[in-house]
Image (spheres, helix red, strand yellow):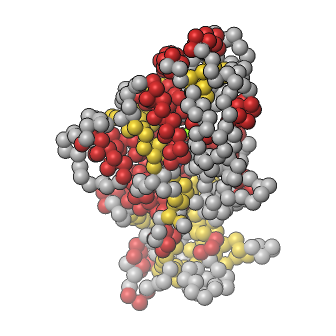
Amino acid sequence: MPENVPETASDFISEFIKEDLKNGRFGYVHTRFPPEPNGWLHIGHCKAFYIDFSMAERFKGKCNLRFDDTNPEKEDISYVEAIKRDVKWMGYDWEDREFYASDYYEYLYDLAVKIIKKGHAYVDDLTDEEMSEYRGTAVEDKNNITNTPPGRNSPYRDRSVEENLDLLARMRAGEFPDGARTLRAKIDMAHPNLLLRDPVMYRIRRETHYRTGNNWCIYPMYDFQHPLSDAKEGITHSLCSLEYEIHRPLYEWFINEAEVFPSRQIEFARLNITHTVLSKRWLLKLVQDNYVSGWDDPRMPTIAGLRRRGYTPEAIRSFISQIGIAKTDSMVDIAFLEYCLREDLNKRSPRIMAVLKPLKLIIENWENGKAEELEAVNNPEDPAAGSRKIRFTRELWIEQDDFEETPPPKYFRLFPGNSVRLRYGYIVTCTGFDKDAAGTITAVRCTYDPETKGGNAPDNRKVKGTIHWLSAEDAVPMEVRIYNHLFGVERPMDVAPGKTFLDNLSKDSLELISTAYGEPGLAKAAPGDRFQFERLGYFVRDPDSSARGTPVFNKTVGLRDTWAKIGQKTVK
Ligand code: ATP
Ligand code: MG
C-alpha cells in the first residue's frame, strides 16, 4: 500500500481500492477516463473524471485520458479537442498519458486471433436480424435482460479454428461486404444475461475513421475493446457508471480469455439532475435540430455550456464532491448545483450596477451639468478588491419596477412622496412622474437630500429601501440574456406514450433584454469575466456581441437561494 494515503474519505470505491492494495491484488493504482469522442462532455462526465482523477491522486497513482474511439461513423477530431479543453478547464491534468483505443487496433486484432485459437470465438454469417432472433429477447420486460428463455446456437458456431482464422483475416482484408459476417465470442447461448450470449467482437464497417482513415474495415465492439484497452494500459481500477454493471461478467471474460492484465471494473451511480438530460445522445439531438445554439449554449449541461453560463470549475467540483459517490442512482436537485455556484460566486465576483429595464430618474434640485464622484465598494466579501468611483448626475437610470405609481402593500421603493437611498449615493424623495400620451411612464422626478451622501444619513432620515442606479451620462448600453431551465419539468425523460423528451422543452428558457445599461467598467469586460449585478444576480460577459454591437452578458444565477430553504440535495 502506498505510504501516506489520507484516511479521510470512506466511499465504497476507496474501500475496494484499499482492500486490493492490502491483499496484494494490485501494487499501485492507475485509473482512466475513457470518453468516446462523439459529443462534448457534460456534468455527468465531470463526476466520472472527478472520481477517476481523485482516486489516482488519493492513492498516489495515475490517471489516463483515453479516447474510446471505435465507432468511426459518430466520432470526430473536433470532439477530441473539445473534450481535452473541457477536462483541462475543470483543472485536471493527464500529463503525457493521452491514449486512443484506435491505436490498439493491431493489439486487439492479435488478441481476437488468440481467443479464436483457444476455440472461444467464431466467425458468424448470420445477419443482424437473425442474430437477435437466435439470441432471444426478454419477454416480460424489455429492460430486464436476465432470466430470459434460452437462445439457439448459430449454425456457424462450430466452425474449425482454421476456418475462423481464415475468415477473420479475409474480413479484415475487405473480402466481404458490410454486415456480411461478424466475429463472436463463444460463451453461452443459454446464459441468463443476454449480453453473454455470444457477443459480437468485430463487425465489418467501411467507414473512414478520423484517426486510422481507411486502414481498417472491421471495428472492435465496446465490450471487447474496453477491458483489453484497460489491460493494455495497466489500469487497476476501471471506474464507470452503473449501467455497465451488467457488462462486468463480459469485461472479466475477455480479460481471462485474452490472458492480459487483470483490470477490475467498479461501478458507481450515474449523475442525474432535475430539469436536464445527461446523455450525449439527447444533447446531440438538441444541437443538431437547433433547439439550442450549440454544444456551448448557456442552457446546456455541457461543461462548455456551464462555462459560458458563468460557472466556475471550483463550483462544479464542490458540487460533485458534496453529492458523494454512491452505488444507487439518484436524482440531484438542480437547485443544489446553483447553491454551490452562488457560494463560490459570492466570494469572487466584483459588484457592479446594471439596469435591465431602464426608467429615467430626474433629480430636480441637482444642477444641470454637475457631476460628482461617489465611492463604491467592489466586493464586501473581499476587502482586497478595493473600491471604484461612480458618477452621480442629474439624470439617472433606475429599474422600471423600482417605481410604482400606486404602490402595493409593503412596497418600499419609489412612489410619489416616498424616499429611498440610491446605493452609494443620496436619499431621494419622489416628487412626481411624467407620462406620455399612451399612458406610459417616461420619467420619475425627485429631489435629493445633500446631507445623506454615501450613507451619512442623519438619524431621522432612515429609509426602508435602497435601489441601484446608473448615471444616464456614462451608462453603457448592453444586451442581457436571462436563462431558465431548458426543461420545465423535473424529469424530462419521463414522457407520456407518443411523446418525446422534446415535448418537455420549456418555451421560455431564454429571455433577451436588449435595452439594458451598465456601469462604464462593463464595456471593458472580457468574455468570461464575472460580476454580481447588484440586486439582480450573477452575470458573465458572453463572447458574443449583440446585433447593435453592444456587449452581451449572460445571467448565471440569481441571488436568491432556494436550495437553502429546501435543504436536501436529492429528490425522491
Ligand atoms: P452518454 O450516456 O452521455 O452518451 P456515455 O456513457 O456514452 O455517455 P462516454 O463517453 O462513454 O459517454 O462516457 C465516459 C465515461 O463517463 C464513462 O465511464 C461513463 O461511465 C461516464 N459517464 C457518462 N455519463 C455519466 C453520468 N451521467 N454520470 C456519471 N458518469 C457518467
Ligand atoms: Mg458510453
Residue 261 position in % (x across, y down): 37, 28
Residue occupying image coordinates x 43% and y 85%: 462
Q: Is residue 239 left or right of residue 78?
A: left
Residue occupying image coordinates x 59% and y 66%: 397
For the N terminus, the image quarter is top left
Q: In the image, is residue 360 above or below residue 245?
A: below
Residue occupying image coordinates x 79% and y 55%: 498
Residue 555 position in % (x across, y down): 56, 57
**Would residue 195 be visible to someone looking at this image?**
no
For the C terminus, the image quarter is bottom right
Residue occupying image coordinates x 51% and y 35%: 250
57 or 139: nearer the viewer: 139
**Would residue 223 be visible to someone looking at this image?**
yes
308 or 142: nearer the viewer: 142
Q: For ligand 2, which image quadrant applies?
A: top right
Q: In the image, is residue 217 above or below residue 519?
A: above
Number of marks present in the image shown: 0
435 or 31: nearer the viewer: 31
Residue 83 position in % (x across, y down): 51, 35
Q: In the image, is residue 494 above or below residue 264?
A: below
Residue 73 position in % (x across, y down): 66, 27
